[in-house]
Image (tube, helix red, strand yellow):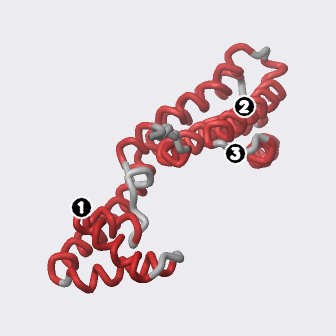
Amino acid sequence: MRALHKENHLVERIGWLRAAVLGANDGIISTASLILGVASAASAPGDALIAGVAGLVAGAMSMAAGEYVSVSSQSDTENADLARETAELASQPAAELDELAQIYVGRGVEPVLAREVATQLMRKDALGAHSRDELGISSHTVARPVQAALTSALTFSIGAAAPLALVIIAPASWLIPAVGAGSLLFLAVLGMVGAKAGGAGILKPTIRVMFWGALAMALTTGIGAAIGKAV
């Protein structure tokens, strides 16, 4: 008998990968845009650095809180559905068996076989079978609020540190082009790393993240310059 080979499915990464890419992307774009907006208003490089540091701290805390609240809401919904399903399995197991069998029939399994499969699965783990095949909740996609919050805060901080480093090392006269070009390069790398980690093609995600980053930085730079002239 041939031994089954172990497969590593990329969907297992979906929880932390989404939070990581979102955090790093937001860290680069928001901090770079903030720095460029302040710098374009004819402020001193020190002002841009202070604004960037403040943006890093505030953004990391905001990302952590936002991810925790958002994913907790998802977790609450999942738990409520699981509790309801548990009650239905206890009060009407026959109806739940029919429901599960019909799900498999709808996927192309013969009715007799579908009922046998549903019976065996429910005998082993009724709630697991219904949560997976009826509710679409699995161990790979279940909400993890703390993981999402910590991942987003950490990756936001890493992303925000990149344009801040450019402020420190770039000459004052080259601050705006250095931060703008460098941040686009960081976004390109992020797009490629995220696509590679998720098993997707590299070109489209990279172009997408660079486009929105460039748009955000251009708008903020323009607004900062206009306000700088006005005041």
Q: Are marks 2 and 3 in contact (CB under 8 Å)?
A: no
Residue drawn at (59%, 41%) of the image: 21
Q: Which picture quadrant has residue 183?
A: top right
Residue furthest out toward the left: 91
Residue drawn at (72%, 31%) of the image: 189
Residue kind at label 2, given as amino acid type: Val
Inter-mark Cα distance, 2 to 3: 14 Å
- Mark 1 highlights which residue? 124
Residue kind at label 3, given as amino acid type: Ala
SS under mark 2:
helix
Q: Position of residue 63 (x, y in %)?
A: 48, 44
Q: Which picture quadrant has residue 20?
A: top right
User: Is residue 8 left or right of 165 when viewed as pictured?
Assistant: left
SS under mark 3:
loop
Residue kind at label 1, given as amino acid type: Lys
Whichever of callouts 1 and 3 sits on the residue coming sooner in the sequence is 1
- Mark 2 highlights which residue? 189
Whichever of callouts 2 and 3 sits on the residue coming sooner in the sequence is 2
Q: Mark 1, residues whose alpha carbon is within 10 Å: few (<14), some, or many (≥20)?
A: few
User: Is residue 67 left or right of 127 when viewed as pictured?
Assistant: right
Inter-mark Cα distance, 1 to 3: 36 Å
- Mark 3 highlights which residue? 200
